[in-house]
Image (spheres, grey):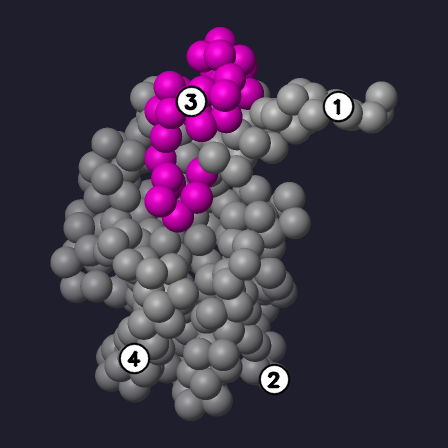
Amino acid sequence: MGGQEREAHFVQSLERGLAVIRAFDGEHRELTLSDVARICDLTRAAARRFLLTLADLGYVTTDGRLFRLTPRVLELGYAYLAGSSLPDIAEPHLEELVAEVRESSSLCVLDGDDIVYVSRVPTTRIMTATITVGTRFPAHVTSVGRVLLAHLPDEQLDRHLARCELLPLTPRTIVSPPQLRAELQRVRKQGYAIMDQELEVGLRTVAAPVRDGDGTVVAAVNIPVHASRNSVDSVRRDLLPALLATVARIEADLHVVRR
């Protein structure tokens, strides 16, 4: 941590906690306890205390061996997407998509059992739900959530399905874990998700995954529409191609920035 003298007000434990967060970067998205101790020049006991505290606060998640940051670190000044951030990269492409299809579009990430909106380009059309950056919904009832859940490792998906209460928000909401698992397998195979009024009656959405340079799904982009104006077939026919093309452009820019 360095041996220079500090002012009397300096809180070394805060410095060390922030160092633990900074240990995770583009090349080190998952770290073991020993990795964190080595990178931050901490004892294993100290590294364990910091990591478990950050996990308790929701900033870190672990499978028992590997630790990684969660999108909740956005609360710390958008540290999770700092620099050339994913929202910054995506937003111009979302604006082009909205201008083309005349529907709103958003970029979302997975945070625990919820999805979180990190970028949104609206239209003048008003949906029932007021959605802004930071809005959260249960992942299983959103198209972006289905996309993100579908690309989780099997063991993480198993844990999600075991702990998540599948509440019926509309009569169409899937509430059966086996049925949801089958739907997620279909989403993963086809490369997109279409949701038909499972979050809100009258709302249909389509979403596709955004992958980083190593192929990991890091976010998803959606287009929500009124069911009265758009059938499932028209969403697939008229909106999905534009959505997939937009995601491809976001990924191309993301790969250049993070190369």
Which image quarter holds the C terminus? bottom left
Q: Is residue 110 above or below residue 100?
A: above
Amino acid identity at mark 3: Arg
| Residue at (24, 56) in percent of width and height | 215
Which image quarter holds the N terminus? top right
Q: Is residue 166 above or below residue 44?
A: below
Q: Residues within 10 Å of mark 1 (few under 14, many from 20)?
A: few
Q: Residues within 10 Å of mark 4 (few under 14, many from 20)?
A: few
Q: Is tag 2's residue or tag 4's residue first in the polypeptide sequence? A: 2
**Mark 1 or 2, which is nearer the eye?**
1
The residue sitting at the right extreme is: 8
Numbered-mark total: 4
Is disc 1 placed on a helix, strand or loop? loop
| Residue at (55, 75) in percent of width and height | 121
Amino acid identity at mark 1: Glu
Please tell me whether residue 44 belongs to the stretch shown in magenta: yes
Q: Which residue is mark 1?
A: 5
Q: Which residue is mark 3?
A: 38
Pointers 3 and 1 in contact (C-beta within 8 Å): no
Is disc 2 placed on a helix, strand or loop? loop
CA gap, disc 3 and disc 1: 22 Å
Q: Residues within 10 Å of mark 3 (few under 14, many from 20)?
A: some
Please tell me whether residue 5 belongs to the stretch shown in magenta: no
Q: Residues within 10 Å of mark 2 (few under 14, many from 20)?
A: few
Q: Which residue is mark 4?
A: 245
Q: Is residue 175 above or below residue 33?
A: below
